[in-house]
Amino acid sequence: MAFPSDYRYTKEHEWIKVDGNQATIGITDYAQNSLGDIVFVELPKVGDELTAGKTFGSVESVKAVSDLYAPATGKVVAINESLATAPEKINSDAHGSWMLRIQLKDAGEVNKLLSADDYDKFVKEEGGQ
Amino acid sequence: MRYLPKSPADREVMLREIGVHSVDDFFKAIPAEYRLDRDLKVPRQMAESEIIDYFRERSQENAAGYAAFLGAGAYHHYRPVIIDALVQRGEFLTSYTPYQAEISQGTLQAIFEFQTMICELTGMEIANASMYDGSTGAAEAILMAMRVTGRHESVIARTVHPEYREVIHTYLHHRDMPMTFVGYQEDTGETKLDELEKSVTDRTACVLIQSPNFFGSIEDVAAIAEIAHRKGALLVVSIAEALSLGIVKPPAEADIVSMEAQSFGVPLGFGGPYDGVLGAKEKYVRQMPGRLVGETKDKNGNRGYVLTLSTREQHIRREKATSNICTNQALVALMSTIYMNVYGREGLKDLAKQNLAKAHYAAGEFGKRAKVLFPRGKRFNEFVVQSKEDPHAINDRLLEKKIVGGLSLKKFYPELGNASLWCCTEMNTREQIDAAIQAVHA
Amino acid sequence: MKPRKVSQHVNQNEGLIFEKSSPGKKAYKLPPLDVPEVNPEKLLGEQAREDLGLMPEVSEIEIIRHFTRLSTWNYAIDLGMYPLGSCTMKYNARVNEFVARLEGLGNAHPYQPEKISQGALRIIKTLQECLCEITGMDTITLQPAAGAHGEFTGILLIRAYHESRGNPRKKIIIPDSAHGTNPATAAICGYEIINLKSNAEGMVDASLLASVVDDTVAGMMLTNPSTIGVFEKEIHRIADVLHDKGALLYMDGANMNALVGKTRPGDFGVDVMHLNLHKTFSTPHGGGGPGSGPVACKKILERFLPTPVLTTRTDGKLGFEYNRPQSIGRVRAFYGNFGMFVRALAYIFANGPDGLRQTTEDAVLNANYIRKKLEGIYELPYKTGSMHEVVFSDHLQTQNGVKTGDIAKRLIDYGFHPYTTSFPLIVPGALMIEPTESESKEELDLFIDAMKSIAQEVQDDPQLVVSAPHNTRVARMDETTAARKPILRWKPEQKAQATPAPKPELVETR
């Protein structure tokens, strides 16, 4: 699996792509592969606040639910509405399927997260267990 | 022991192949001080005939063949014979929850049909595969409304079945979920709309009413819905007498319906098992507790059925589940499914009309010699009679004539004085009704 | 290889009942009305219903055929073994069905006068006494409708107990091996959950437990034997650790089939527990219910029991007592699933003390026989002795890309219902097998042969297992689409499309 080098990653398998003062967030290809066919995504509303490290929603497959953890702190400015009717987009293109866009409180926060290489190593270790 | 299919020789062979001396080896993990070294003090093993004799005696002590005028959440309707003939088939009776869809299509399709018919009758867009009963269904419906709205208060009509209200109290009171109760009008027995208006706030998750209510009066669902919705609250309608839907307009303005379907082919059985079910608007499906059966295709394109949206449930979400419910009431729901098919579109209407006629006749006859309360209320098959005598004394007298009179309301609604709740179904003959009224006024 | 237990048989094609419906068909006839007719529009005004929409209109024979055909698509205990762990799928005796339907019991209205309910009340009393004796508890409520409902009741009792002492406390400890209803219940009762990691033997680590119990802990929910089928050896210490800090021990009684007649939870320190009448006491599963989940407890919790409570009046007659100021209230209307009480009591009578003990011994013998025969073929993650159920893992099979769920589906081709897959969570790729005492040596051997054969198939032809089942009327369902685009009811626009019966030339027995 190739992980886009301009994204940052969390150990809970979310990615975040910074764009100035805003950022988009999604889950990684590794995550969608582990979950299987995604049937539903539960997202916050525009205007809600995200706190880094805390859960902000969940992603459901037929037999499992996984919490989504915020990679950074900020206010939700947009939600990807198409995921409500076509959650399978995440399975076919996890890195290209953004879930939400936030206005970052502190863009520097993201630098603490894993780089594509570090995340790749992390995932390889997890898979090996 | 006739339920155990192993001979002593079988046991010997098995122990030898496992490599242990005796079966007690397997119980060594139990600390010695806790191992029972005596027989349990339960009755000795009985022959099948003795078991039947025991329960026959209990059945006789319980008395059958009385003319009964009790309703109040459990209704005496005729049970077509075909119901037991079908549900006693081993493939229905002794099958498991349909988690393995390929070998449970019988159960799954029957539930799918049940869900469909409940929707048609209640006016809801979706229905689940059953809840324990009407009382717990009402409590779960309120919790569901809280999840949907994010609010934590509820407004409940006093005309909801008293025991349902007790159950709701048990479910809510320790969780900081305040309940407000609204009274009823003297002339109709319906919920007071002005009091309701004042009680619903922007913290109210839902209004809960029952229709027909505990007094037998049909509530003004549309008006109550308007009040609830205007303040952003949901309307939950509880239905205790499912057969009312044969002739009474369904509560289509409700957001959630909690119904007790015992009237549909489930025996009175001294209070259980009964047959709750929840219905709701489709947009609330993810907050609905209980099992749901969905239609799908198998990998060869054949139509089939499967338990779906399981991620709401406890076996996946654990502490974040919509409810802790696991077992439902599948076999009794099957009884209801068969019942609804037997009567069907015309039969449920005809049967409901008969109930309406019987109760109307009885109320009319009662009215000649006693006071029938809530005279301007619209009723289905129950009504409240107020007498000079204490209902308990009346009922003692009736019992001697092998009549079971209406339920005394003194415990639940002391403000009504000597009042009792009477129910007439298609099972009460005119002679019985006449004899009962005669005896009440003796 | 041709499975010994099954061969292809014909399953009749059948659509939805709505697809057979047509106006004018009837399956009912009402007796003539003996009171004056009424006009619903006049009586009910705008509350009168116009029509009943898409409710079906069919004849009696169509109903009988419809449901009979549907029934033939189900597996059932009457057909063969269900090796489902912690479900205790035992024989549902038919005498139970007969006695439950006796008129005085089946047609009794819950509000009928006590004078004509003495039979029902006596049944309740006798069952209560038997269950208290079996569990070693002081008192019991039969009100909860099922196991999860019983857990709810039990935790509320614990809460009421602590509240009466001034502090409801905040937390409940639950082992990570627990059934999902346990944490779901604790959360509903407003408690925070402390997840307790099991030790290397799959059991509660009493020292770890001691380190987390303090006076903010209300209690612990324990299943014993645990969900991996082993008896908690340190149960005494577990109970002491909790009681020392004033916490209570709740036991999930799902696995009572390993204990009845051999030991009693009340003796080993349990304060409150629920029973599953539809497991241990043979009341039928009926495709998913009804169940019954009585809650038994020690005297200290008696005054909090749900209202009403059975009592003996001064004249010796039985009745219900409603004046219970400290009760947690009702958990449901009326008295509980009385129909299940009758069946459970009939089961106890049919067994007697010797039968109950023998039942437990046979259940444990059967599980250990399976364990011995499949050891080495499937991996045993925990070597501790099994009681009435054994848990394997799919570790040896995943090497060939086959998982527990696939093996379970292939087992269907051999004529069995699958065992419990993927639970408990502490065993990745779990195969949880509980045969119960109702299985003969013959049936067990057929099961063992099937499991051995599948293990061989995993070596020789894993794709066969991964794509199973092959011999069922319908293949694996598309659960993804069912969850993404739920269709939860029939609508007339949905084209009639019953599943065709398999064509004869396509039938192969593998």
Image: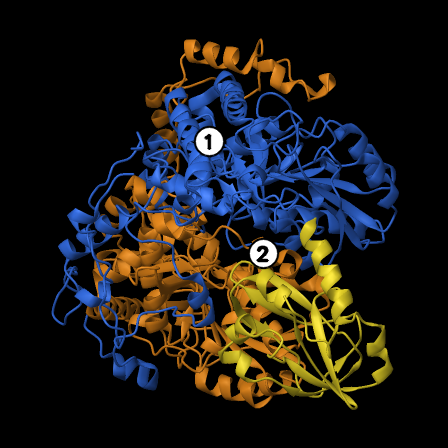
Report the side of B242 relative to C269 (left or right): left
Front-lying residue, C299 or C489: C489
**Amino acid type at mark 2:** Ile
Report the side of A81 relative to C78 (left or right): right
Q: Please identify the quarter of the rendering in which residue C76 is found.
A: top left
The subunit letter for the residue under badge 1 reads C
Residue B105 position, x and y percent, is 33, 53
Which colour represents chain A? yellow
Residue B340 position, x and y percent, is 27, 62
Front-lying residue, A126 or B209: A126
Residue C341 position, x and y percent, is 47, 38
Which colour represents chain B? orange
Residue B396 position, x and y percent, is 42, 48
**Amino acid type at mark 1:** Leu
User: For numbered disc 2, what is the local secondary structure?
Assistant: helix
User: For numbered disc 1, what is the local secondary structure?
Assistant: helix
Front-lying residue, C153 or B113: B113
- Density class for disc 2 (Cα within 10 Å; few <14, some 14-19, many ≥20) is some
Q: Is residue C467 above or below residue A52?
A: above
Which colour represents chain C? blue
Q: What residue is pinned by disc 1?
A: C345
Q: Is residue A1 above or below residue B222?
A: above
